[in-house]
Amino acid sequence: MAKRVGVEVSIAVADAVKLANADVIPAYPITPQTHIVEHLSDLVANGELDAEFVPVESEHAAMSCCCGSSAAGARTFTSSSSQGLSLMSEILYHPGPMRLPIVMVVANRALAAPISIWNDHQDIMVQRDIGWIQTFAENGQEAFDLTLHAFRVAEDRRVSLPMIVNIDGFTLSHVIEPIEILSQEEVDRFLPSFKPRVRLDVKKPVSMGPVGVPEVYTEAKMAHNEVLKASKKVVVQAWKEFADLFGREYHPVETYRVDDAEALLVTMGSISETAMTAVDAMRDKGEKVGLVRIRLWRPFPGPEFRKAVGKAQVLAVIDRCLPPGAVCGPVGEELRSLFYKVPGAPKIFSFVAGLGGRDVTVERFNEIVSKARAYAKKRPTENYEVIGVREQ
Amino acid sequence: MAISDAIIGWKTLPFGCHVMEPGNSAKFRTGDWRSQHPVTDREKCIKCGMCWIFCPDMAYSQTLEGYYEANMEYCKGCGICAHECPKDAITMVPEEG
């Protein structure tokens, strides 16, 4: 039976990996992901988890090792953050088209310069287009559940793609929360053993990762993109089954008090819970404000998002990433593209907030909503606005 | 639809773009972009097989008389055999035309 315990979220994530019975864990420690791999290293050293823990020399080596072990048919897990994730970048593009179902938890953190160990989404937005399935957790329970869900989806033979679970660094990774830890028997009911479609086998040799000449490359990228888009169905099915077994429901796009809402906040990750508090306060004052949270970032759930928005006329989109020189933040761009020339589309206003560990408070959400509503009445001169920035 | 230079469709591409047939690089004839080819002087050749050992494309094979000959379907003309030959028996000759 599941047990509700007070536990640090990183430890709960490591316990999820143990319950998933991962075979190979190549990892390099980096703040704020450290406790996840540290605890996994403990579990392996203590004989509680029968896995190969590979203390690699860098994140570049970690992801290379992941590709090799996944290709050999081992259930493979790693975790990273920020600069470490950037060092992995070259290899991160390989497992998608090669259909290697590696699971990674990213404890999201800002990128230098200036050096920052604190939370925002800039590390993962740099890796937006690596072709992995990506989800975002809002709290510790979700971090645990989504990690198990990731193994189930990634290794599904219809999918066979790598998958990232994003958890906000410190805000989630280092917080102690009451989390329901599933029992081994319960996890075994949800997660079957890994049966790869193809694996490296001396008895049946194959070559993985060959060169893609111009006569093949486009088709290979197309095949990967199509299977990534089609994976949404399996992502949703696995969540449905998870809900049937354990009672916790997840959807690609989550809504909060959106009925009759005129203006909607759009968030990803742990700030969503603060946003709910802000929405409650605004609703108490009679303002018709709601919240839409993107849980599945890749493949982007376009139809689900449009449905979630309903008839709302104003979207206040929050990006925890400032892409220098761009038109606006990546989530803002995504939604503007999604609604481009759609009849009755809402007005979309992009805000950048919560960079490098700066808190996004209830007051900030109030400010964002009132600005978006004011801008909706007269066209703003800028494409986006940085919230809570001091000028002098 | 415009004619594509693709050799396979995305729906028929093997899973993960893997090469499922072992050893099929033999079907990839790499000799057609060679700019020079090796010619062995059998007067100097001592049949030591260094060219056969060093050839990165395994283009060399041994003849019945024990000499080594490069298969021009695979030889890329890199010249490693000529460089390694202890008797300087191999000369690289430019391709004509």
Image (cartoon, rainbow, N blue to C red):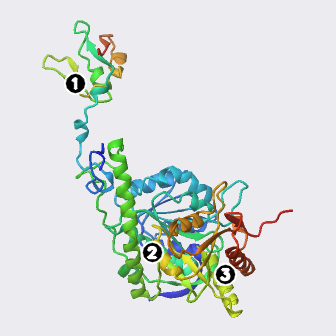
- Within 10 Å of disc 1 (Cα), the crowding (few <14, some 14-19, many 20+) is some
Name the residue carrying label 2.
A303
- Mark 2: secondary structure: helix
In this rendering, would A81 be left or right of B56?
Answer: right
Q: CB of mark 2 within 8 Å of CB of mark 1?
A: no
Name the residue carrying label 3.
A274
Residue A24 is drawn in which quadrant? bottom left
Name the residue carrying label 1.
B71
Nearer to us: label 2 or label 1: 2
Picture residue at 55% right of the left edge, 89% below the top: A259
- Within 10 Å of disc 3 (Cα), the crowding (few <14, some 14-19, many 20+) is some
Q: Is residue A98 visible?
A: no
Q: How many dots with numbers?
A: 3
Query: Which quadrant would the C terminus of chain B be assigned to in this image?
Result: top left
- Please determine whether, in this image, residue A317 is positioned above or below residue A240: above
Same chain under badges 1 and 3? The reply is no
The chain holding disc 3 is: A
Same chain under badges 2 and 1? The reply is no
Q: Which mark is residue B41?
A: none
Picture residue at 69% right of the left edge, 62% below the top: A117
The chain holding disc 1 is: B
Q: CB of mark 1 within 8 Å of CB of mark 3?
A: no
Q: Amino acid at mark 2?
A: Pro
Q: Is residue A233 visible?
A: yes
In this rendering, would B88 be left or right of A25?
Answer: left
Q: Amino acid at mark 1?
A: Asn
Residue at mark 2 to residue at mark 3: CA–CA distance: 26 Å
